[in-house]
């Protein structure tokens, strides 16, 4: 049986916000969102997988904006 420190957690990192959503990227660069305000999930927060919603569930204009803003890692520009 595993102890808490032995459980593997995925890297679901909050990378930004859009309206009342935290934008989350997993270790493969896939984008998700969580319905919450910025204070509940600040940038850098690791989000539980069961909280994530696929951005494909959003209206097209919201999904397109999030993809345009967050698909390319801002860290790659450095």
Image: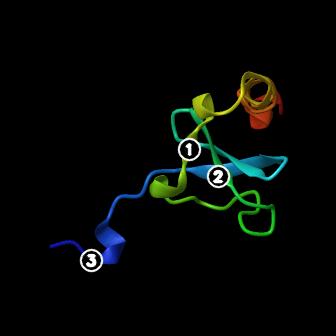
The residue singled out by tag 2 in the image is 34
Give neighbour class at mark 3: few <14, some 14-19, many 20+ (Cα, 10 Å): few
Residue 63 in which image quadrant = top right
The residue singled out by tag 1 in the image is 53
Q: Nearer the viewer, mark 3 or mark 2?
A: 2
The residue singled out by tag 3 in the image is 3
How far is disc 1 from disc 2 in space, using C-alphas? 6 Å
For residue 6, side relative to residue 1 (left or right)? right
> Element type at marker 3?
loop
- Earlier in the chain: of badge 1 and badge 2, it is 2
The reply to whether the C-beta atoms of the residues labelled 1 and 2 are less than 8 Å apart is yes
- Earlier in the chain: of badge 3 and badge 1, it is 3
Q: Residue at x 68, y 54 (%)?
A: 35
Residue 61 in which image quadrant = top right
Give neighbour class at mark 2: few <14, some 14-19, many 20+ (Cα, 10 Å): many
Q: Residue at x 77, y 37 (%)?
A: 75
Give neighbour class at mark 1: few <14, some 14-19, many 20+ (Cα, 10 Å): some
- Does residue 20 sit above or below 6 in this rendering? above
How far is disc 3 from disc 2 in space, using C-alphas? 27 Å
Pick out the residue farthest to the front.
59
- Does residue 60 sit above or below 22 in this rendering? above
Q: Residue at x 33, y 75 (%)?
A: 4
Pick out the residue farthest to the left.
1
Q: Which mark is residue 63?
A: none
Query: Which x, y percent locates residue 3?
Result: 26, 77
């Amino acid at each position: 049986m595993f102890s808490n420190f032995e459980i593997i957690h995925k890297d679901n990192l909050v990378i930004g916000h859009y309206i009342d959503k935290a934008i989350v990227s997993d270790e493969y660069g896939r984008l998700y969102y969580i319905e919450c305000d910025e204070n509940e999930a600040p940038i850098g927060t690791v989000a539980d997988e069961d909280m994530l919603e696929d951005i494909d569930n959003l209206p097209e204009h919201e999904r397109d904006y999030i993809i345009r803003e967050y698909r390319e890692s801002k860290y790659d520009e450095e």
